[in-house]
Image: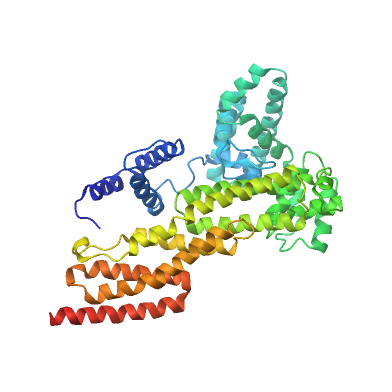
C-alpha cells in the first residue's frame, strides 16, 4: 500500500535502488546489527531490503554464482566437483573444498605459480572448445593439473620452515585459510585417477547403508585404492555423496571399531567419518542461519530437517554419553540451532497480532489493504513453526514451539469473530482492508489448523462479505 507517508516514500526509494546498491546496504546494516549498533529506522529498512532481495529475479548474465570461473578453469577444476561446497573461506572442512576459493586459487596459478604454462593451456583449451574436441581438452587439462600439483607441492614444501614465505604465499592467494584450501585442492588433483576408479565401483545411489551395503562399501574402502592415505578421506566423501541419508556414513566408523563408543571409534582410521558428518552439520547450521536471516523459510525448513536427521542418527548410532570432543561438538550445534530457531519463532505471535488486530474505522485509510508480501512472509513463518514442532525434541526446542503454537491457536480461535464482524459491518472505503485481514486469517488458520478448518473459515468470510455488501447497498 502507498499513500505518500514518509515510510512509504522510504520504501519506494529503497525498492528503486539498483540491485548491487541494495545488496551492499543490506550487508552493511546487518554488520551494524551484529555489532550492536543502533541505526535509525534500521529494522524497517532491513525488512524492506530482505523482502526485495528474496523477490528479485536474477539479472541477465548474473544467474550463476559470482565466483564461477572461465571454461579453462572449469575443466582444470572438474575433478573437484564431488567435493565442492558453498561456504565462506573462513571455514575449512575435511575433504571438502569451498567453491568460493577456486577463483582466487586459479588467479594465483595463472599469475604467480605457472603463468607461461597457464597462458598456453588457456589458449589451447579455448581453441579446442570451439572445435568441440573434448578428448584432447581433457588430456590437456590433466597434463596441466599434474604440472600445477608438482610445482605447488614444491612451493609448499619450501615454505615449511619459512614463516615469512608462508605468509607471502597466503597473501598472494588472498583468502582466509588459503594454504588449507590449497592443500585440499592439490589433494584431490593428486588422487584424481584413484578417485575416478573408486567412484566407478560405487553404486550410483545407496538408499540405505545397511548390513549388505555396509560390508561391500567397507571392503571397497579397505582396498588398496580406497584405503590409500592420500585417497581415504576423499573416498569417504564420495561414499557420502551416494548415500540417500548422508549421515549414515558414521555406520562405517561403528563397524570398523566394532563398537558404538566414541572413545573406541576415535582411535580407528574411520573416526574421520564422524568428523566429516559433524563438519556437514556445521555447514548446515551456518546455511540455516543465513536463510533465516534472509527470510527464506521454505529453504530453512529443509535445512532444519537435515540437521534434525543428522543429530538423531549420530545419537542413535553412537554412544555419545561421555565427555568426548564429538559429544561436545554435537551439543554445541544443537544449542546453536535451539537458540537460533527460538529467537525467530518467538516473534511469530506478535507479528500475527499486529496484522490481524481489529482496527477502528478511524484507524483505516480508505482503499488500503495489508501488505501482501508481509502476509506471505508471516505465513511462511507459521509454516516454519509447524516444521520446528516436528523436530522439536531432537533439537531441544520443545518448550518454545509448544508455547508459540498454543499462542497462535488461541489468537486465531478468539480473534476471528471480531474480524468477521468488522467485515460484515464496514463501509465501502474500509472493505479492502477488512477483506485483506480476513483473507490473511484464512491463510494463517490453514497452516495452524489444517485445510478443512481454513475452508470452513473461508466460507464464513464469504457470508460475512456478502452480508456487508447487502447492508452497504441498503444504506
Q: Is residue 38 above or below residue 179?
A: below
Q: Is residue 377 above or below residue 190?
A: below
Q: Is residue 425 above or below residue 4?
A: below
Query: Which residue: 44% across, 65% down?
Result: 408
Residue 29 appears in view? yes
Figure quadrant of residue 359? bottom left
Left or right: 412 as drawn, with respect to 424: right
Q: Quadrant of the C terminus?
A: bottom left
Residue 225 appears in view? no
> How many tags in the picture?
0
Q: Observer-nearest residue: 182 or 127?
A: 182
How far across and how far down the image is residue 284, in percent?
A: 59, 50
Q: Quadrant of the N terminus?
A: bottom left
Residue furthest to the left in view is: 475
How far across and how far down the image is residue 361, in percent?
A: 20, 66
Q: Observer-nearest residue: 254 or 452?
A: 452
Left or right: 319 as drawn, with respect to 335: right
How far across and how far down the image is residue 380, in percent?
A: 45, 61
Query: Which residue: 13% across, 82% down?
Result: 474
Amino acid at each position: 500500500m502507498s499513500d505518500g507517508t514518509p515510510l512509504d516514500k522510504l520504501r519506494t526509494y529503497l525498492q528503486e535502488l539498483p540491485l548491487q546498491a541494495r545488496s551492499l546496504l543490506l550487508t552493511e546494516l546487518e554488520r551494524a546489527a551484529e555489532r550492536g549498533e543502533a541505526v535509525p529506522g534500521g529494522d524497517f529498512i532491513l525488512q524492506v531490503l530482505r523482502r526485495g532481495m528474496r523477490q528479485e529475479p536474477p539479472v541477465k548474465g548474473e544467474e550463476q554464482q559470482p565466483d564461477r570461473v572461465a571454461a579453462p578453469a572449469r575443466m582444470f577444476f572438474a575433478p573437484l566437483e564431488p567435493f565442492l561446497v558453498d561456504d565462506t573461506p573462513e571455514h575449512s572442512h575435511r575433504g571438502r573444498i569451498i567453491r568460493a576459493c577456486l577463483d582466487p586459487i586459479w588467479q594465483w596459478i595463472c599469475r604467480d605459480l605457472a603463468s607461461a604454462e597457464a597462458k598456453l593451456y588457456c589458449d589451447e583449451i579455448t581453441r579446442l572448445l570451439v572445435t568441440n574436441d573434448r578428448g584432447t581438452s581433457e588430456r590437456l587439462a590433466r597434463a596441466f593439473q599434474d604440472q600445477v600439483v608438482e610445482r605447488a607441492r614444491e612451493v609448499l614444501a619450501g615454505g615449511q620452515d619459512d614463516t615469512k614465505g608462508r605468509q607471502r604465499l597466503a597473501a598472494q592467494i588472498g583468502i582466509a585459510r588459503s594454504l588449507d584450501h590449497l592443500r585440499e585442492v592439490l589433494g584431490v588433483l593428486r588422487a584424481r585417477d584413484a578417485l575416478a576408479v573408486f567412484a566407478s565401483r560405487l553404486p550410483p545411489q545407496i538408499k540405505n547403508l545397511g548390513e549388505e551395503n555396509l560390508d561391500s562399501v567397507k571392503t571397497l574402502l579397505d582396498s588398496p585404492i580406497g584405503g590409500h592415505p592420500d585417497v581415504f578421506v576423499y573416498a569417504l566423501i564420495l561414499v557420502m555423496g551416494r548415500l540417500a541419508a548422508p549421515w549414515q556414513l558414521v555406520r562405517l566408523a561403528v563397524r570398523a571399531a566394532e563398537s558404538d563408543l566414541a572413545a573406541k571409534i576415535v582411535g580407528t582410521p574411520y573416526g574421520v567419518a564422524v568428523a566429516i558428518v559433524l563438519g556437514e552439520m556445521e555447514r548446515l547450521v551456518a546455511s540455516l542461519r543465513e536463510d533465516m536471516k534472509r527470510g527464506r523459510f521454505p529453504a530453512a525448513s529443509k535445512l532444519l530437517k537435515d540437521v534434525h536427521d543428522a543429530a538423531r542418527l549420530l545419537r542413535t548410532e553412537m554412544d555419545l554419553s561421555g565427555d568426548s570432543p564429538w559429544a561436545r561438538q554435537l551439543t554445541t550445534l544443537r544449542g546453536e540451532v535451539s537458540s537460533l530457531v527460538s529467537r525467530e519463532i518467538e516473534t511469530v505471535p506478535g507479528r500475527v497480532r499486529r496484522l490481524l488486530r481489529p482496527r477502528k474505522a478511524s484507524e483505516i485509510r480508505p482503499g488500503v489493504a495489508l501488505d501482501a508480501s508481509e502476509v506471505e512472509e508471516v505465513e511462511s513463518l507459521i509454516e516454519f513453526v509447524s516444521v520446528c514442532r516436528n523436530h522439536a525434541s531432537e533439537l531441544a526446542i520443545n518448550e518454545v514451539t509448544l508455547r508459540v503454537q498454543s499462542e497462535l491457536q488461541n489468537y486465531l480461535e478468539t480473534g476471528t469473530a471480531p474480524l468477521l464482524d468488522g467485515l460484515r459491518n464496514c463501509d465501502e472505503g474500509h472493505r479492502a482492508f477488512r477483506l485483506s485481514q480476513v483473507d490473511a486469517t484464512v491463510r494463517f488458520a490453514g497452516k495452524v489448523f489444517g485445510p478443512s478448518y481454513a475452508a470452513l473459515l473461508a466460507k464464513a468470510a464469504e457470508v460475512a462479505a456478502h452480508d456487508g455488501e447487502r447492508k452497504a447497498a441498503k444504506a
